[in-house]
Amino acid sequence: MTWHVAEEDLRAYAQGELAPPLLWSADTHLVACARCRAVLAEVGDPVGLDAGWERLDAELDAPRPRLFESLLLRLGVADHTARLLAATPVLRRSWLGAVAAVLVMSVAAAHTTQATAAPTLFLALAPLLPLAGVALSYGPALDPTYEMAVVAPVHGFRLLMIRTVAVLVAGLGLNGLATLALPGFGLHALAWLLPALALTATGLALTARLGPVLAPSLVGGAWVALLLAARAQGAGTLVPFTAAGQGVAAAVAALAGGLLFLVRDRFDRFQGSAV
Ligand SMILES: [Zn+2]
């Protein structure tokens, strides 16, 4: 081992002031390096460090829907994976509540404008929700299990996939329920599904290069720009929700999925670059 955490970084780390990606490197490195742990113990303010662990303990021990966790266990999910999922912040009630509210509003809007061929606002918003959920589930700012994730030897990519699948299932499930509330539109109301998969996969694939904030923002912005451009072209069903648009969405989803698989190592290096 040739690299060690600089002493000033360890001081900042102990005070909880070290920012990613240095924080991730330090976290990962400290697990494996006794020498740096010793330096940390010397320079560090142990209160700050203890506070970090206490915060993590409190988060993990906080009462949360046991139902969800035991359901996952019953489905055959390994118990540490179930724990990570149950503590995923976007799966908490606040996020699900916000998603449900947006869906209810857009469904209501669709019902009041029955004149058009498709529930445009609902179709426009629905693909953004899984993208936002996955983006929010990846990053230290919102994630109480983040510290556990860097301390525990869970592969960055594996963790990302576990989170993504969980958030996608929750998001797509809610979107699906909203679709059931729009029976008048028939299959038209399902036209959000392929765009949702395309946006989420593209956002994740770009995250490896652009980071967890810029990538989903760009993808979301591009989606909105595309819809506005399609709307400017004329009335009727917007291009992304036509048969051709759906085919393009499926192709983009498949391409981005393949790209994501190719760059999967980057997510591990994200966390393990210093070891
Ligand atoms: Zn070291």
Image (spheres, helix red, strand yellow):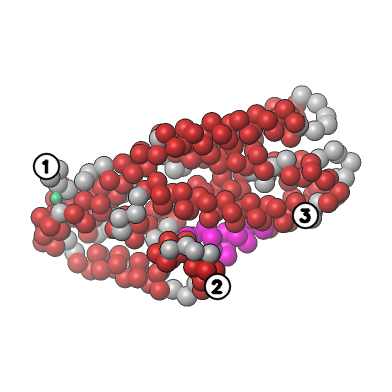
Examine the rendered structure and indicate whether residue 203 appears above or below residue 68.
above
Residue at the extreme top: 233
Q: Measuring from the top left, give residue 89's x and y in whole percent.
A: 49, 60
Amino acid type, residue under disc 2 in the picture: Leu
Q: Measuring from the top left, give residue 235's x and y in whole percent.
A: 83, 29
Query: Who's the residue at 24% across and 64% down the image?
Result: 49
- Measure how far apart labels 3 and 2 are at the Cα level: 25 Å
- Measure how far apart labels 1 and 3 are at the Cα level: 58 Å
User: Is residue 63 visible to us here?
Assistant: yes
Q: Measuring from the top left, give residue 267's x and y in whole percent.
A: 37, 42
SS class of the residue under badge 2? helix
Q: Is residue 92 magenta?
A: yes
Label 3 Cα neighbours within 10 Å, binned few <14 / some 14-19 / many ≥20: some
- Majority secondary structure in the magenta region: helix
- Measure how far apart labels 2 and 1 are at the Cα level: 47 Å
**Disc sitting over residue 2 in the figure:** 1
The reply to whether the C-beta atoms of the residues labelled 3 and 2 are less than 8 Å apart is no
Query: Who's the residue at 19% across and 67% down the image?
Result: 46
Q: Quadrant of the N terminus?
A: top left
Label 2 Cα neighbours within 10 Å, binned few <14 / some 14-19 / many ≥20: few
Q: Viewed as shown, does residue 106 lie left or right of 77?
A: right
The residue that disc 3 covers is 180
Q: Is residue 64 magenta?
A: no
Labels 3 and 2: the sequence-earlier one:
2
Amino acid type, residue under disc 3 in the picture: Leu
The residue that disc 2 covers is 67
Labels 2 and 1: the sequence-earlier one:
1
Q: Which numbered disc, 2 or 1, marks the residue closer to the eye?
A: 2
Label 1 Cα neighbours within 10 Å, binned few <14 / some 14-19 / many ≥20: few
> What segment is highlighted magenta in the picture?
88-100
